[in-house]
């Protein structure tokens, strides 16, 4: 009987050690690290925030059904000239799991749509419960600076898994401020500085993502700029930001 009790206790200890080892292995798998030609995973701390206003996402407002959740996701974007660096960042809009995918290692981005596609596996996303990418993930393809800035230049991104859209009819921008604020938005066609869309002042709560959509279905190809101007609630300090991008409505494969 005595030996039986020892055996039971020893078995319980071994089972506990096995469970702990498995948990640590899972955490290590999820940890932000190099995965082929990109980095992906969860970081141990909350992702850093801009002191002012930050662009979390700028993508084409297009959705495919993701039930069941696909094994891979794809990004596609248009640029006017070949570039050796496009700074792609995919991260949570609400930073709960501290997920990020970035540092894509590619040096031959091409003019136009052709060749500007990147795919990555969804095993990490699936294992941490991020299976609604259109609602949960922000996507930015920065052309000038790898980090958030109040002056951005980006390539609008199509997020999909099987087939990108044939035509772009609407864009979705997601921003976040570090303080409570009020801000108004204007979209200008840069070729002639023509105001093509305006959204009156709206309230932004500190740390809460704000979604801005622009219907571009009737707008021609060209350079555009989204401008945000506002002030912080406490102190009335003014601030502004802008996002430059090229609108090419017809997507070629």
Image (cartoon, rainbow, N blue to C red):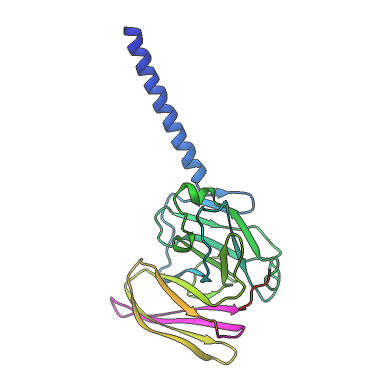
Q: Nearer the viewer, residue 106 or 77?
A: 77
Q: Which residues are magenta?
A: 218-247
In the image, residue 156 lies at what x, y percent?
57, 72
Residue depicted at x 69% and y 75% = 81
Q: Is residue 108 left or right of residue 149?
A: right
Q: Is residue 225 left or right of residue 201?
A: right
Task: Identify the image quadrant of residue 103.
Answer: bottom right
In the image, residue 244 lies at what x, y percent?
55, 79
Q: Classify the position of the N terminus by image quarter.
A: top left
Q: Is residue 53 left or right of residue 120?
A: left
Q: Is residue 228 magenta?
A: yes
Residue depicted at x 46% and y 37% = 24
Taken as a whole, is the magenta stretch helix, strand or loop? strand
Q: Is residue 134 magenta?
A: no
In the image, residue 213 lies at what x, y percent?
46, 76
Residue depicted at x 42% and y 27% = 17
Residue depicted at x 68% and y 68% = 253
Q: Is residue 113 visible?
A: yes
Q: Is residue 52 visible?
A: no
When the figure is inspected, residue 219 is found, relative to residue 155, above or below; the finding is below
When the figure is inspected, residue 104 is found, relative to residue 240, above or below; the finding is above
């Amino acid at each position: 009987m005595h030996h039986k009790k020892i055996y039971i206790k020893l078995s319980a200890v071994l089972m506990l050690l096995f469970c702990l080892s498995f948990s640590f292995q899972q955490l290590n798998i999820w940890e932000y690290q190099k995965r082929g030609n990109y980095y992906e995973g969860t970081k141990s701390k909350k992702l850093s925030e801009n002191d002012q206003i930050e662009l979390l996402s700028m993508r084409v407002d297009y959705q495919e059904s993701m039930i069941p959740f696909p094994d891979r996701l794809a990004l596609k974007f248009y640029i006017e000239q070949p570039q050796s660096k496009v700074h792609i960042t995919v991260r949570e809009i609400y930073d709960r799991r501290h997920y990020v995918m970035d540092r894509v290692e590619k040096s031959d981005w091409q003019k136009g749509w052709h060749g500007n596609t990147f795919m990555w596996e969804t095993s990490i996303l699936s294992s941490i419960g991020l299976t609604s990418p259109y609602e949960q993930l922000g996507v930015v393809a920065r052309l000038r600076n790898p980090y958030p800035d109040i002056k951005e230049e980006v390539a609008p991104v199509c997020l999909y898994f099987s087939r990108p859209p044939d035509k772009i009819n609407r864009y979705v921008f997601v921003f976040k401020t570090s303080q409570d604020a009020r801000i108004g938005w204007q979209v200008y066609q840069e070729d002639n500085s023509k105001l093509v869309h305006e959204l009156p002042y709206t309230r932004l709560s500190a740390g809460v993502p704000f979604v801005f959509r622009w219907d571009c279905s009737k707008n021609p190809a060209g350079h555009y700029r989204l401008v945000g101007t506002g002030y912080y609630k406490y102190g009335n300090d003014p601030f502004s930001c802008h996002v430059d991008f090229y609108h090419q409505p017809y997507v070629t494969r």
